[in-house]
Image (tube, helix red, strand yellow):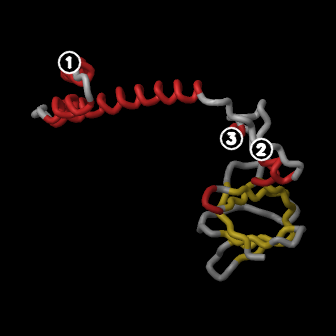
């Protein structure tokens, strides 16, 4: 603990002295020349990073001045096409589109079991009342009976799991028909 605290303090003190190097230089060429003279690789890297940060900050402030002096930007015309109107977020939703909850019906479907059978490799094959047939991918045991209500839930990378609300067991399945 003491060693890491001492190392951190040393690093902060040395970086504080390095941060002033590029700021003292009047031009970018002088600041680069000062950084090239550093023998320690870490100090040299910090020096170059500081030059980039100060250059970025000065560029951003000059861009802001230029943008303020130019004519105001007009918004794009709004089309009456419903497809493009739907894609554009409203001003109240701007920046929050990704935080909306996903439609649960698209990720999970409840069905009633019509028929249960097994493959020659003892993999579970389940037919549901809506005509869908799902086959087990893994080799784990799953207790399922005709007439029970189960769900198929979408996972990542187009994987699916078969489960029941009455217990916490699930198995990996794939759609056959």
Q: Residues within 10 Å of mark 3 (few under 14, many from 20)?
A: few
Name the residue rendered at 89%, 68% in the picture. Answer: 130
Residue 5 visible in the shown view: no
For marks 3 and 2, the one nearer the N-term is 2
Q: Secondary structure at mark 3?
A: helix
Residue 63 visible in the shown view: yes
Name the residue rendered at 40%, 26% in the picture. Answer: 58
- The x, y position of residue 28, in whole percent, is 26, 31
Q: Is residue 59 left or right of residue 104?
A: left
For marks 3 and 1, the one nearer the N-term is 1
Give the image quarter of residue 47.
top left
Q: Nearer the viewer, residue 158 or 120?
A: 158
Q: Nearer the viewer, residue 161 or 106?
A: 106
Q: Residues within 10 Å of mark 1 (few under 14, many from 20)?
A: few
Q: Is residue 43 left or right of residue 100?
A: left
Which residue was labeled with disc 3? 98
Q: Nearer the viewer, residue 77 or 95?
A: 77
Q: Is residue 116 left or right of residue 120?
A: right
- 3 or 2: mark nearer the eye: 2
Please report contact status of discs 1 and 2: CB closer than 8 Å, yes or no: no
- The x, y position of residue 71, in whole percent, is 65, 30
- The x, y position of residue 43, in whole percent, is 19, 30
Q: Which mark is residue 88?
A: 2
Q: Nearer the viewer, residue 136 or 96?
A: 96
Q: Secondary structure at mark 2?
A: loop
**What whole-number distance in Å separates the C-alpha atoms at marks 3 and 2?**
13 Å
* 102 shown above or below 113: above
Please report contact status of discs 3 and 2: CB closer than 8 Å, yes or no: no
- 3 or 1: mark nearer the eye: 1
Q: Which mark is residue 17?
A: 1
């Amino acid at each position: 603990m003491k060693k890491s605290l001492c190392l951190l303090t040393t690093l902060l003190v040395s970086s504080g002295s390095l941060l002033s190097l590029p700021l003292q230089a009047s031009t970018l060429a002088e600041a680069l020349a000062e950084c090239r003279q550093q023998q320690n690789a870490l100090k040299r890297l910090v020096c170059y990073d500081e030059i980039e940060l100060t250059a970025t900050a000065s560029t951003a402030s000059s861009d802001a001045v230029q943008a303020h002096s130019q004519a105001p930007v007009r918004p794009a015309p709004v089309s009456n096409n419903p497809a493009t109107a739907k894609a554009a977020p409203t001003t109240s939703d701007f920046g929050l589109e990704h935080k909306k909850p996903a439609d649960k019906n698209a990720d999970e479907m409840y069905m009633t079991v019509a028929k249960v059978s097994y493959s020659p490799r003892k993999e579970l094959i389940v037919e549901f009342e809506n005509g869908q047939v799902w086959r087990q991918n893994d080799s784990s045991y799953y207790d399922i009976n005709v007439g029970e209500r189960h769900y198929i839930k979408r996972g990542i990378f187009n994987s699916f799991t078969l489960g029941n609300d009455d217990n916490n067991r699930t198995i990996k399945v794939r759609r056959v028909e």
